[in-house]
Amino acid sequence: MDDEILDDQRELVSLLESAGWDVTDSELSVYESPWEDDEAPEASITLSARKRYPEDEEDDSPYRVK
């Protein structure tokens, strides 16, 4: 089961990276569900990612700090 969860995490990271994001942090938690009566484990994956966007030269937004 752990290999399957890790494969899912790798797939999510790969999807983000293929979309141009840099994954900066990953947290994986595996636990038994407190809401279900079965003993199937659940997983929670938290990913942090960043992506730089090109600066718009003609951006005259009054909210931009110059």
Image (cartoon, helix red, strand yellow):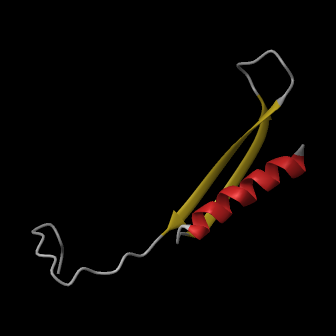
Task: Decide: is 26 above or below 42.
Answer: below
Find residue 50 and report its horizontal and vertical position in percent. 49, 68
User: Which of the 4 image quadrants contains residue 31?
Assistant: top right
- Residue furthest top in the image: 37
Q: Quadrant of the C terminus?
A: bottom left
Judge whether residue 23 can be spotted in this image. Answer: no
Residue at left 84%, top 19%? 38
Judge whether residue 30 can be spotted in this image. Answer: yes
Horizontal relation, residue 38 to residue 54: left or right: right
Residue at left 81%, top 54%? 6
Q: Quadrant of the N terminus?
A: top right
Task: Decide: is 62 above or below 7.
Answer: below
Task: Decide: is 15 above or below 51.
Answer: above
Residue at left 15%, top 66%? 63
User: Which of the 4 image quadrants contains residue 49?
Assistant: bottom right
Find residue 11 and report its horizontal and vertical position in percent. 71, 58
- Residue furthest bottom in the image: 57
Find residue 34 and report its horizontal and vertical position in percent. 73, 22
Total number of numbered discs in the rendering: 0
Horizontal relation, residue 2 to residue 24: left or right: right
Residue at left 15%, top 81%? 58
